[in-house]
Each structure stands twice: as C-alpha cells, then as structure tokens.
Amino acid sequence: GVPAAAAAATALSWLLEDDRWLRPPSASSGGSSGAAAAAVPHEDQASAPAALGEDRVAAPPGVVDCEQEQQQQQQEPGDVMEAEWVLRPLLLRLAARYLLAEKRRRFALCPVAHFHLRNGASCWRLNWRSDMGPLGLQRSFGIMVNYDYQLGAVYDNNRKYLLQHEVQAHPRVLELLQ
C-alpha cells in the first residue's frame, strides 16, 4: 500500500494575486470589476456574524495556527479587534466566493485556484491572518488558502473540475458561502 504521508499533500497559496475582482466597478469597465460586492451579506446577515473561531477548520496536529500565534504575540487595541470582528466574516465569505463560485469561462477565476483544482486538489481551508506582511495584506488581506491533494480523490476531482466545472471543497469552506 501507499504510506499515509504519500497519500495526501497540501499546498498553501495567496488568493487574489492583484486580481481586479475586488476593486470597485468603474464606468470604463462597464461594471464588470468589483463582483465582490454581490457576495457581501445584507445588513441583516452581517448583524449576527458567526463566532470568530468557527469559520475555518481546526489546524491538524503539527500545523501552526497562525492566528493563535499572532494573538499571543501582541494585544491589539479594542478598535482594531472590533474592526476585525466585522471584517473577518465578510472577507472570509468573499474569499470563499472568489475561490469557489467566481468563474472565467466556467473555470475558477483565480489562476492559482485553477491550477490546483485542475490538478485534482480540493479547497480545504481558508486561513485568517495567515500572512500579515505587506505582500500578504496586499495580495489577499492576509488570508491564505490550503489546497488538499488526496491521492485517492485526485483523478475524480480533476474530472469533476474539467468536465463538469465543479469545485471540490471541504464542508467548512462551503459553509462560508451561506
């Protein structure tokens, strides 16, 4: 048989790579950019965001929880924490929509997601505050995504993506779209 370590692998990536998807629509673009506005919940949905710890899958053994580590390193002022409380569910919802639902020619709009999905990966986890450096904030607001390659599912995931344009994702990532 295949050793357990060889049966699965993950890849970690930024989301946006300077994509125009999040930019506000302009008259010159015909309103095509800024599709992210459609993914933002209405006021009644945003008034009761999910608990902060419930919007991602728990880190598996041996994986550093970037968010928890950063929280231990510094205490943030109340206004920053309040802003994060509001922004976190919105940005994670936008990230999930960008990765799972936004399409170009029926394939993932995100070129990095397209690469991993066509190679048989699934969208496994969104990582809040994973890269808080200047480049990570610019590229994806500090959010990064894990793609999961399960050897037994790679072929099926590849076929579903290429032939049926279905993106395979962990249920916790799918919940972010609700």
Image (cartoon, helix red, strand yellow):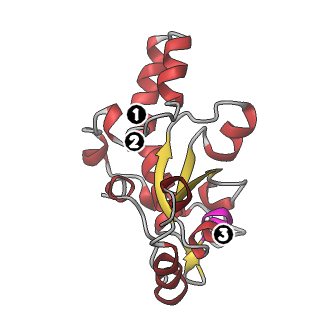
Q: Which of 55 and 59 is in front in this view?
A: 59
- Magenta-drawn segment: 109-113
Q: Nearer the viewer, mark 3 or mark 1?
A: 3
Q: Which of marks 3 and 2 is in front?
A: 3
Q: Which of 129 and 124 is in front in this view?
A: 124
Q: Mark 1 = which residue?
A: 86
Q: Nearer the viewer, mark 1 or mark 2?
A: 2
Q: Is residue 110 magenta?
A: yes
Give how far across and how far down residue 15 sits, in percent. 62, 53
Asked whether residue 16 appears in the rendered view, the answer is yes
Mark 1 vs 2: CB contact within 8 A:
yes
- Marks 1 and 2 sit apart, C-alpha to C-alpha, by 7 Å
Amino acid bearing label 3: Phe
Amino acid bearing label 2: Pro
* Residue at the image point whose x is 44% and y is 13% from the top: 78
* Residue at the image point whose x is 62% and y is 70% from the top: 114
Q: Nearer the viewer, residue 170 or 6?
A: 6
Q: Does the magenta stretch include residue 157?
A: no
| SS at circle 1 | helix
Give how far across and how far down residue 45 sits, in percent. 27, 47
What is the number of the mark on residue 115?
Answer: 3
Q: Mark 2 = which residue?
A: 89
Report the predominant secondary structure element of the magenta stretch.
Answer: helix
| SS at circle 3 | helix
Amino acid bearing label 1: Val
| Mark 3 or mark 1, earlier in chain | 1
Give how far across and how far down residue 16 sits, in percent. 65, 54
Q: Looking at the picture, does residue 39 appear above or below residue 103?
A: above
Q: Using residue 43 as the reference point, say whether residue 14 is left or right of it.
A: right
